[in-house]
Amino acid sequence: MVSSEGLCGSQPPIAAPVTQYGVTKPISMAGPTAADIQRSRDLEKFLVQAGLYESKVEASKREEVLGQIQEIVTNWVKQLTRLRGYTDQMVEDAKAVIFTFGSYRLGVHGPGSDIDALCVGPSYVSREEDFFFVLHNILAEREEVTELQPVPDAHVPVMRFKFNGIPIDLLYASISHLVVPHVSLNHLLF
């Protein structure tokens, strides 16, 4: 349908194109009002008082635990590389990389929540034997690890355990490279 304005020859000014994400247009492009901002502050204050945020001490402990797990899986892959007869240079370059995902990665976890983590290793390290047998045994020998439970037959095979009291769900995937490249998580996600 054509409006009478379009027939008169008067054209509306050309606006800069707006990028639209999704199928429908946004309900509103307006920013938050002062009342919205105050409600957000009140909600955050309530959540803090209710104990739904972890303390800085627990946050530091989680980061420390992830660093220790990273060190363990790197040493595990180096050990397997050496046992399989690869060169000294390959052993030096060998590594696995831990990536977090889920509520921890999103920053919406609460105190006591588990950390979902993915261990990415080289092509010659298998989930069935190396992850669920060799790494399992390495973790079982560590005093920091409790409640170690491999679940290899789950829809998503996972090794569950607590490391210094922090619950961890660890998954494994190998990539089709002999050496895991140094890649940031942002590069993988975006």
Image (tube, grey):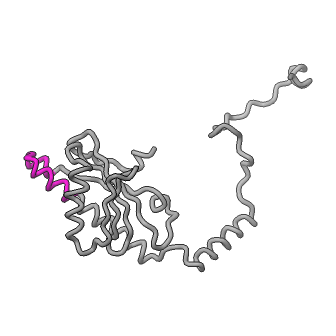
Considering only vertical position in the picture, is 177 above or below 186? above
Describe residue 116's horizontal placement relative to residue 127 as left or right. Answer: right
Outermost front residue: 153
Question: Looking at the image, which residue is at 31% across and 52% down?
Answer: 172
Residue 144 locus on image (x, y percent): 27, 74
Considering only vertical position in the picture, is 140 above or below 152? below
Q: Which residues are magenta?
A: 74-92
Question: Looking at the image, which residue is at 29% across and 53% down?
Answer: 97
Residue 9 picture quarter? top right
Describe residue 2's horizontal placement relative to residue 90 as left or right. Answer: right
Question: Looking at the image, which residue is at 45% across and 62% down?
Answer: 104
The front one of 131 and 179 is 131
Which SS does the magenta portion mostly show? helix
The front one of 66 and 115 is 115
Residue 125 locus on image (x, y percent): 21, 48
Q: Quadrant of the N terminus?
A: top right
The front one of 50 and 159 is 159
Residue 110 is a magenta residue: no
Residue 89 locus on image (x, y percent): 11, 47
Describe residue 65's horizontal placement relative to residue 58 as left or right. Answer: left
Outermost bottom residue: 49
Q: How many marks?
A: 0
Residue 13 locus on image (x, y percent): 78, 31
Describe residue 79's horizontal placement relative to residue 136 as left or right. Answer: left
Considering only vertical position in the picture, is 77 above or below 25? below
